[in-house]
Image: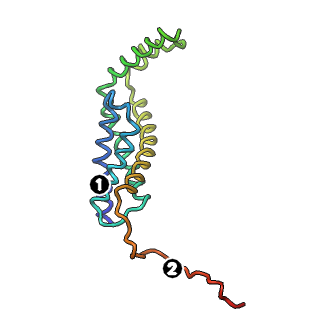
Amino acid sequence: MDNQKSAMFSSALIAGAVAGVLSGIPFVNCLCCLWIIGGGMLAAYLLAKNTPIVLSAGDGAIVGVFTGIVAAVVRALVNIPFHSFNVEFLKKMAEGLADYGGEMPPGFESFLEGGAAQITVAGFFIGLMVSAVILSGLGALGGIIGVSLFGKKPKPGKTEGVIDVPKDTGDSQS
């Protein structure tokens, strides 16, 4: 059992790091949800490859949740150096929308000029918690899909854990 736990955590660390880096890089992060689902699938694949037992959908969900949490932490750390680039991109996009759509809401320009350019510790941790919840859900989905695609299938003759219930043939005499 401990071997399966260590395989689960190592699979989640590897897949979460890959998914977190890919979802944290600007322009590559446009597929953020797909990177996280793919990371959960990768974790399920690595887990299925490293364990000899048949995995259930619950195992895939668990490794996917861990993958999503790791990806959220890695994504938050990768986003730090790109923060100023993202703010500039948001400013240019808002200016372009203002040219085509009219006026921006009151206070939006001051938000872009001052408030959005600073990273606060509280804002960082709130964003990390929110993304951890969302990414762990997406990772669980990817893990379930990954186990169904890459997991070992139970052997037909193996009945371990199956309860044999006799069929009612209708021949009972009451």
In this image, 73 relative to 97: left or right? left
Q: What element carries label 1?
A: helix
Residue 67, horizontal then vertical, whole percent? 36, 47
Which mark is first along the chain, 2 or 1? 1
Note whether residue 164 is visible.
yes
In depth, the one of 16 and 144 nearer the eye is 144
Position of the N terminus by quadrant: bottom left
Checking the image for residue 139, the label placed there is: none
Q: How crowded is mark 2: few (under 14 residues within 10 Å), some or many (20 or more)?
A: few
Residue 6 seen in the current view = no
The residue lying at 34 percent from left, 56 percent from top is 150
**Which quadrant of the structure image shows residue 172?**
bottom right
Q: In which quarter of the image is residue 3?
A: bottom left
Question: Nearer the observer, disc 1 or disc 2?
Answer: 2
Q: Mark 2 highlights which residue?
A: 164
Q: Which amino acid does label 1 sit on?
A: Leu
Q: Which residue is drawn at 34% across and 54% down?
A: 44
Secondary structure, mark 2, is: loop
Residue at the image point whose x is 31% and y is 36% from the top: 22
Q: In this view, which residue lies farthest toward the right?
A: 174
Q: Which residue is drawn at 37% across and 48% down?
A: 40
